[in-house]
C-alpha cells in the first residue's frame, strides 16, 4: 500500500473516532434524559418520527461507524494474522458497506 493511502486511512480512522466520540456522548446523554424522565419507547419514537435533525445525527453516527470499524478491523487482521492485500481490503470494504446500509436502514425506520 502506498504511503499516501496509509496516511488517508490513518486520517479517516482518527477523524471518524472524533465524530464517534461526540456521537456516543450525545446518544448516551439522550438515553439518560429519556430514562430519567420516564419516556417510553413509543414516546421516544414519537419524538424521532419525522425529525430531520435526529435523522441527520444518526446518519452521521452510522457513517462514522462504517468508516472507523473496517479500518480498525483491517489493521487487526493484518497484525494478528499477517493477512494483507487486495482480498483483505475487499473484505473490510464489504463490511463497511454492510454496516452503512444496515445502520442507515435502521435510522430511516426510526425516522419514518
Image (cartoon, grey):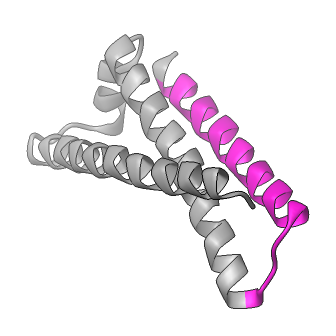
> Residue drawn 41% across and 10% down?
50
Q: Is residue 101 highlighted in magenta?
A: yes
Q: Quadrant of the N terminus?
A: bottom right
Residue 14 appears in the rendering: yes
- Residue 111 drawn at (x, y percent): 47, 20
Looking at the picture, does residue 110 appear above or below residue 62?
above
- Residue 74 drawn at (x, y percent): 68, 67
Camera-side residue: 83 or 65? 83
Outermost residue toward the front? 3
Task: Report the label total.
Answer: 0
Looking at the picture, does residue 48 appear above or below residue 14?
above
Looking at the picture, does residue 112 appear above or below residue 89?
above
Q: Quadrant of residue 27?
A: top left
Left or right placement of residue 57 versus residue 22 in this view: right
Residue span colored magenta:
81-110
Q: Is residue 91 highlighted in magenta?
A: yes
> Residue drawn 27% across and 38% down?
40
- Residue 19 drawn at (x, y percent): 35, 43
- Residue 64 drawn at (x, y percent): 48, 43
Camera-side residue: 90 or 50? 90
Magenta stretch: dominant secondary structure = helix
Residue 51 appears in the rendering: no
Left or right placement of residue 105 versus residue 15 in this view: right
Q: Quadrant of residue 38?
A: top left
> Residue drawn 40% across and 46% down?
15
Q: Quadrant of residue 103?
A: top right
> Residue drawn 9% across and 47% down?
36
Outermost residue toward the left? 36
Amino acid at each position: 500500500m502506498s504511503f499516501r493511502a496509509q496516511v488517508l486511512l490513518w486520517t479517516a480512522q482518527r477523524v471518524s473516532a472524533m465524530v464517534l466520540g461526540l456521537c456516543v456522548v450525545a446518544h448516551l446523554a439522550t438515553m439518560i434524559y429519556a430514562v430519567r424522565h420516564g419516556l417510553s419507547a413509543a414516546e421516544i419514537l414519537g419524538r424521532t418520527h419525522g425529525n430531520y435533525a435526529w435523522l441527520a445525527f444518526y446518519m452521521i453516527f452510522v457513517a462514522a461507524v462504517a468508516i472507523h470499524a473496517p479500518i480498525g478491523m483491517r489493521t487487526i487482521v493484518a497484525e494478528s494474522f499477517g493477512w494483507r492485500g487486495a482480498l483483505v481490503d475487499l473484505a473490510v470494504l464489504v463490511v463497511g458497506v454492510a454496516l452503512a446500509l444496515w445502520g442507515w436502514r435502521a435510522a430511516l425506520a426510526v425516522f419514518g
